[in-house]
Structure formats: C-alpha cells, structure tokens
Image (cartoon, grey):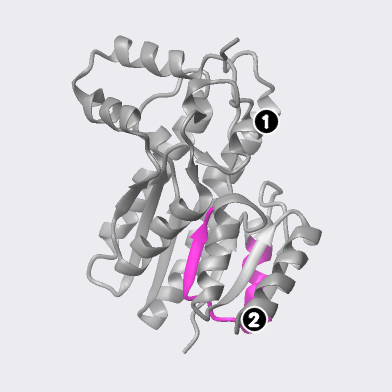
Amino acid sequence: MSKTALITGASSGIGLEFARIHAKRGGNLIVVARSADKLNALKRELEEQNSCIVTVIEKDLVADGAAREVYDAVKAAGIEVDYLINNAGFGGHGKFHERAWEQDLAMIKLNVVALTELTRLFLPDFVARGRGRVLNVSSTAGMVPGPLQAVYFATKAYVTSFSNAIAEELHDTRITVTALLPGATETGFASAAGLEKTGMFEHGASARSVARDGYEAMLDGRLEVISGLPLSQKAMLRAAPMMPKRRLLRQVRQMQEARS
C-alpha cells in the first residue's frame, strides 16, 4: 500500500529531494510551499516519472493560522498522512540587535511554531491509527550557540530537543520521530541567509545526499541523524562540550564572519 508523505518546503533544496525520493519509491505526496508555480511544476515532474499522486497546497507557513489551514485541507480531501516531513525553514546572518525584528520573528514562526503546530495537529491521528513517522529537519547548528546567527541556531536547538522529547513520549507506540541534523548543504540557503562568503559553506553536501540520509533514518525509526558534515566541523562538534564556552563562541563567530 502506498504511503503518503506531507512535505513542507517542498519546492526546493532538501524538501524537493525528499519529494523525489518518496515518489521514486511509489509513495503519494502532499507538497506544501509558498510558490504554486514551483509546486505545480514538481507535481507534473513526479507524476510523469513515477506512479504517484501529488497534491499541491500553496501556503506561507509564517502566516497566522496557516498550519491549521494545511491540516484542514488534508482532512477535507480525505487524505491519510503516513509521513510528516517538517522541512520548511530559513536562516539569516548578522548581529541580533542590528537585524530586522520582523525577519527573526518570521524565522521563529516558521522554524519553530509551524513545525510544532503541524506535529501537534497530525500526531493524534498517527496515535489513533497506531502508526506514522515524523521527520523534523533540524541542523548541526543547533548543537552549539550561533553568534551572527543567534536566532537560527536557537530555533534548530529547539527542533532537536522537541523531536527527541516527543520520540521518547511515544516509545511504546509504533510512531517514530526523527531529527535530521544537516551540516552545510548546497540548497540556496547560504545565499538566502547571506552566508555565501563565510567559511560555513566551503564544503557543502548535496541536498540529495542529505535528504537520502534523513529519509532512510526516518524509515528506520532512528532518533536522529547527522548528515553532510565536513571533517573539520565534525571535529569541532565533538570537542565542543569540552571547550571553554568563550573559545567555542569565538570559533563559531569566526566561521561565520564574511571573508573579503
């Protein structure tokens, strides 16, 4: 029986690759993003190349009530979601006190509030059926504080903590919750966040490889998976708990400072 995956942020990057991977395996999809044109192009691509049905929901998840509207649209269409993949998110570069508050507030609404609300809406359905999988896209950024990306790093710390916690709450069920923690990934995120001239994205992993790692970890019911992390950053993250906090903060800041 085909499994239906709902994927947010499905029009580009890792979300787009999630959709392609799932469709290739014969699964149906509900794809959610702001761009109807991109979603409809994706629908044509996936339905022409695979045996699947793709439902498009054009929605800006930053808007108040958007998550509930997505859920209501799915219920009204009579579609049963098997996999909830909360992928939508964005970042931003600069000193917190100098950045536009509206940008950081939108980031919190998308990275934290929309993800949490969609999980809260769909999870009771999973529990009632006794099956379902949730994949929340976090980041290795959430493993350390992030000077010059203070809000983004904090939102991803939340996503990992939240995902781990509810996974344990559901330990005696057939529902799993997985956190995907990518490193720097070639998705367009860097240019959108103003990070293309920093050291963070020198060796970005492909969106396809990161999506594949996350998708497989979700199917395996793993608690979390780190993907696409360069060796230098792996070493830093392993050492982070033992480093003096000031030194760690300085090192992270230096990695994010723009290079001439």
Q: Name the residue located 29 percent from the left edge and 65 percent from the top edge.
A: 170
The reply, left or right, for residue 196 in relation to residue 222 is right
Residue 41 in picture, x, y percent from top left: 76, 65
| Mark 1: secondary structure | helix
Q: CA distance from mark 2 to mark 1?
A: 35 Å
Quadrant for the C terminus, please. top right
Report x, y in % for residue 102.
Answer: 70, 29
Which secondary structure, mark 2? loop
Residue displayed at 28% across by 15% down? 245
Q: Quadrant of residue 213?
A: bottom left
Query: As drawn, which residue projects farthest toward the left?
Result: 242
The structure residue drawn at horizontal position 44% and vertical position 13%, both measured from the top left corner, is 254
Q: Is the residue marked by circle 2 packed among few (<14), some (14-19), or many (20+) residues within 10 Å?
A: some
Residue that appears at 24% across and 13% down: 244
Tell me if mark 1 has few (under 14), some (14-19) or many (20+) residues whose alpha carbon lies within 10 angstroms of its own: few
Q: Which residue is mark 1?
A: 103
Give, as a three-letter code, the residue at label 1. Answer: Gln
Q: Label 2 amino acid?
A: Ile
Q: Position of residue 77 (x, y in %)?
A: 68, 81
Q: Earlier in the sequence, mark 2 or mark 1?
A: 2
Foreground mark, 2 or 1? 2
Q: Nearer the viewer, residue 48 or 38?
A: 48
Residue 53 is marked as 2
- In the rendered structure, the answer to whether residue 87 lies left or right of residue 35 reads left
Q: Is residue 76 magenta?
A: yes
Q: Which residues are magenta?
A: 68-87
